Amino acid sequence: MKKILILILAMITSGFAAAAEMEALSDAEIVGIVLAVNQAEINGGILAQSTSSHPDVKAFGHRLTEEHNDSTSQFNDWANKTNITPRSSSISETLKADEEKHLERLKKLHGILFDLDYINHEVESHQQVINLWDGKLIPGTKNEELKRLLNLWRASLVGHFEQAKLIKTSLGRKK
């Protein structure tokens, strides 16, 4: 089972990385990617709150839901203020498709299996998103206010990544 999950993750990661490197993005596409990331985290967070049996995982899901909702509001406010309509790109579409598959798999799990899969995915996906932020979104942004927002929310992503790693380490230990 673990080998299959590693293989699936490797295929998703390589496809995600290839899509991310192939295209220069407009600010509208960058916002579209941010909104896709936010929606994926909101959907996963809601599922974790309702399905997890571990209080740290439930709390983490709640944090992700709240903070990614805030991020969505701020990026939508920026888009409205600058009269830019967020647009899809191959990156945002890949993110959405990958996250839908992951959510369907998670919905079939319960207890510690759910918690482990969810947190492992959060560690991996946050690392990928931070890499995308640093390698593509921030350097590709043309608007300085959008760049400021991306930098602001990058710090939040790093916080999520670090918290997910801590929870991953603690799962299975008796408290």
Image: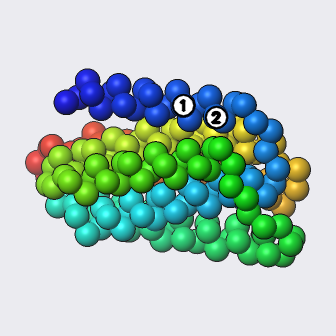
* Horizontal relation, residue 111 to residue 95: left or right: left
Q: Secondary structure at mark 2?
A: helix
Q: Say above or below: 132 vs 21.
A: below
In which quadrant will I find the N terminus?
top left
Q: Residues within 10 Å of mark 2 (few under 14, many from 20)?
A: some
Q: Secondary structure at mark 1?
A: helix
Residue shown at 37%/43% (left/top)? 121
Residue 83, given in percent of the width and then of the height, sits at 86, 72
Residue type highlighted by circle 2: Ala
Residue shown at 58%/71% (left/top)? 70
Q: Which mark is residue 19?
A: 2
Residue 4, given in percent of the width and then of the height, sits at 27, 28
* Horizontal relation, residue 105 to residue 16: left or right: left
Residue type highlighted by circle 1: Gly
Q: Say above or below: 33 vs 67.
A: above
**Marks 1 and 2 close (CB-CB < 8 Å):** yes
Residue 100 visible: yes
